[in-house]
Image: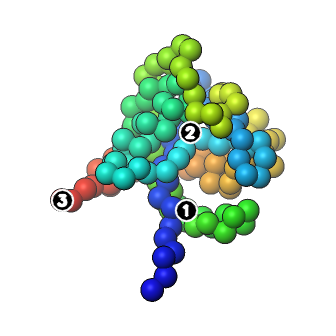
Amino acid sequence: MSDWHAHVTVATVVERDGRFLLVEEHADEGIVLNQPAGHLDPGESLFDAARRETLEETGCEVELESVLGIAQYTSPANGVTYLRTTFSAQLVREIEGARLDKEIIRTLWLSPEEMRRESDRMRSPLVMASVEQYLAGRHWPLDLVYYTA
């Protein structure tokens, strides 16, 4: 029996005035741009993970609005397979002076055009694909995700 498993991750797409919240962060492949994103912790819901990761990486509290998609991606950089649930979220508030995760260099608000110009710096193709889903209006209700005991 193999000990292989997919890494379960979450991400949020947060739009404000036509710009999208991104983080510039240190990764194995160098300095990259990404949505607020990260791994699901044991015992945590996907919803809680998305809100937590957004807060830890950006200092922003958000309210989840919809599911943008569920993607499977195998990184050519490390061979790891990720199962990523991406949510759209509304900014509730920015916490001034919030301590961000150590990998985070800074937060940015970029337009889709600016993001496309920076496509070679995206952590994965999922970053732009998620924004394209958002812009195309491909939003599913949050109750698409449910939990059983």
Looking at the rendered structure, the secondary structure element under dot 2 is loop
State the image coordinates of residue 2 (x, y, percent, origin top left): 49, 82
Determine if residue 143 is in view. Answer: yes
Callout 2 amino acid: Pro
For disc 3, the neighbor class at 10 Å (few under 14, some 14 to 19, many from 20) is few
User: Residue at coordinates 47% horizontally, 58% vertically from top-left?
Assistant: 8
Characterize the local packing of mark 2: few (<14), some (14-19) or many (20 or more) Cα atoms within 10 angstroms.
many
| Disc 1 secondary structure class | strand
Tell me the distance, in whole angstroms, between the alpha carbons under discs 1 and 3.
24 Å
Q: Name the residue under label 2.
A: 36
Looking at the rendered structure, the secondary structure element under dot 3 is: loop
User: Toward the viewer: 15 or 147?
Assistant: 147
Counting from the top left corner in percent of width and height, residue 56 is at 51, 32
Q: What residue type is labelled 3?
A: Ala
Q: Quadrant of residue 50?
A: top left
Which residue is labeled 1 in the image?
A: 82
Instruction: Confirm or deny contact between disc 2 and disc 1 (CB under 8 A).
Output: no
**Depicted 46 relative to depicted 65: above or below:** below
On the rendered structure, is 89 left or right of 148? right
Q: Earlier in the sequence, mark 2 or mark 3?
A: 2
Task: Determine crowd level at label 1: few under 14, some 14-19, many 20+ residues with C-alpha closer than 10 A.
Answer: some
Q: From the viewer's perspective, is 30 left or right of 54?
A: right
In the image, residue 109 sits, relative to residue 45, either above or below, namely above
Q: Earlier in the sequence, mark 2 or mark 1?
A: 2
| Disc assigned to residue 14 | none
Q: Name the residue under label 3.
A: 149
The x, y position of residue 136, in whole percent, is: 56, 48
Q: How is the image coloured?
A: rainbow
Q: Which residue occupies the foreground of this view, 70 or 96?
A: 96
Q: Quadrant of the N terminus?
A: bottom left
